[in-house]
Image: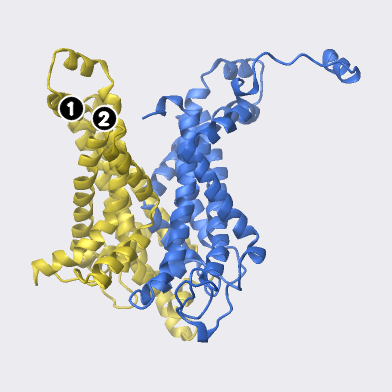
Chain colours: A yellow, B blue
Amino acid sequence: MTRYISKRLLAMLPVLFLVSFVVFMLLHLTPGDPALIMLGEEATPQNLAALRHELGLDQPLPLQFLSWMEHIVRGDLGRSIRTHQQVLEAIVERLPVTIELTALAMLISLFIALPTGIISATRRNSFLDLFSTTGALLGISMPNFFLAILLIFIFAVTLRWLPPIGYTPIQKDLLENIRGMILPAITLGAAASAIVARLTRSSLLEVLSQDYVRTAQAKGLAERTIIYTHALKNAMIPVVTIIGLQIGALIGGAVITETIFVLPGVGSLVVDSIFRRDYPLVQGAVLFISIAHLFVNLVVDILYAFLDPRIRYA
Amino acid sequence: MTIQSSAQSLPLRVPQPIARPSERGGARDFLSRLLRARLAGVGLIIIFVFTTSAIFAENVSPYSSTKTTLTNRLKPPSEKNLLGTDELGRDILSRVIYGGRVSLQVGVVSVGIALLVGVMLGLIAGYWSNSLLDNVIMRLMDALLSFPAIVLALAIVATLGASKEGEIPKSIWAIGIVTVPAYARLTRGQVLTVREREYVLAAHTVGAPDARIMLRHILPNVTAPLIVQSSLGIAGAILTEAALSFLGLGVQPPTPSWGSMLSAGRGYLDIDPWLVVGPGAAIFLTVLGFNFLGDGIRDVLDPTLRNV
């Protein structure tokens, strides 16, 4: 197991290097002078030169990249050009909100998806199956921002059960915090739950058609035992993979969800800094998100190898 | 060759093959099976309706998409304005029809870019697998995949700057770049199996050049999953474009796009909820159409998945 983990970690190094290269190049994709874009047309030549010097834009590109890499390795993502706050600090400040949102979304989606998928597979072609497969099919095509608007309209504007937007810190009022998180978490979790439900259904159906399940049936085992102790374990293997992949989609979806519901997370930080043309903050946040994404995937892969020893030896 | 030319010159009828067209396989068989898959048919109809209305928007839409009538603001659906009017008194139905141009254009063209680049990279990586070139290409693809798609697309659009009127939407490039890895990986995986087939070995033996083997022998045999991925990819690209426009980073006003219409309508939810229904339904239905089509094609191409 240790060998597997160290092998995976080692394989990640070139990817991490390339990720930081892509993020570095983002600033240099801008048509024209990045300093001018950040400061606007009314900036004085002195200010422009100062910013260029601060960001190292007055140096040759390879040197810039080297110094960028050197800073990243030390955990220094630079400073915001608007607030002069450390980029990493700004991200860490907003991280708890994003973690809470994605965790709740994942929880809600599994809570809906797993029972739905299992019932669909075991009561195949029943009304419930038809209802949930259609629901899942529609759920995959639903844009999360449209779902968010519909949820706000129903539960906040019309029924007035939940606040439409805004965030209350957990330390201040736990109940208000949860109330404010319900709609965003449903918005974010809906697509994931549709995908996981569909896969649970098809994976379980496939396992249920295998010989060892027929053997179990021939032995006269109860249907419950067959499904829950024999079939489900094997059916869950592909489901775990897709759950891991969904985490990436959730992190991406958080950008939109946080912006709509005005939650102060890392996702809305990206969007806000884009509009403020605060490129160091954009670069830092994007780099942070993708590295976090890589590590989450690594953890899922390791868990997966732990659950299914066949993977390690493949 | 001689048989064929004599058949052309003589008024004789060449005997038809015994198998009927539906049993023969090939493009026609594929199409008839696709139409029999109900959901794919529904998907095709939806796509057809939205595409034709977007192309012929000038003839189809009842009003101008940009003309404001301030006396006619925020009206609910009526006989005159089937989907109502927006906050500047513009006809929502007309704006939805014109807005389809942006969504479909970005969806199709960005997937086209991703296909072109991704398939080329995947062919090269798979053909010379385990070479340095393969490693460089695939690690770069891994790096691109490690960004959540929407985050990278956002960052690219932000650096490219806002699209001006009449310009090719910048989101096309962003979404295209972001989706390249999906096609590269898929193609590479397919190439790895196909290049071991006898006909590829045969082509090698007769000394066919690499480019010819890749393009004439391997490529045609890896297209099936690419077609599925493209249809699902267009659905995803339309969603991403709408999300970018929704956040204000897509095409700029007054050009209508579904995402920006939704975003504008969100502010009037308590006064006029009808504002968001048209554009929201349009995104949902188009994406649904391409998802149905993609799923349908996959079922037809891969019979083992049928009935699952």
The residue that mark 1 highlights is A227
Q: Nearer the viewer, residue A147 or A47?
A: A147
Q: Nearer the viewer, residue B163 or A222?
A: A222
Identify which residue is drawn at 12% across, 22% down.
A222
Quadrant location, the C terminus of chain B: top left
- Classify 10 Å Cα crowding around label 2: few (below 14), some (14-19), many (20 and above): many
Q: Which quarter of the figure has residue B24? A: top right
Q: Nearer the viewer, residue B83 or A79?
A: B83
Could you tell me residue A196's position as x and y percent? 28, 42
Give the structural element (helix, strand or loop) at label 2. Answer: helix
Give the structural element (helix, strand or loop) at label 1. Answer: helix
The residue that mark 2 highlights is A204
With B164 as the anchor, is B56 left or right in this view?
Answer: right
- Classify 10 Å Cα crowding around label 1: few (below 14), some (14-19), many (20 and above): some
Tell me which label, 1 or 2, sits earlier in the chain: 2
Q: Amino acid at mark 2?
A: Leu
Distance from label 1 to label 2 (Cα)? 9 Å
Do circles 1 and 2 both sit on a common chain? Answer: yes
| Protein chain holding label 2 | A
Task: Check contact, mark 1 vs mark 2: CB within 8 A.
Answer: yes
Could you tell me residue B33's position as x and y percent? 54, 30
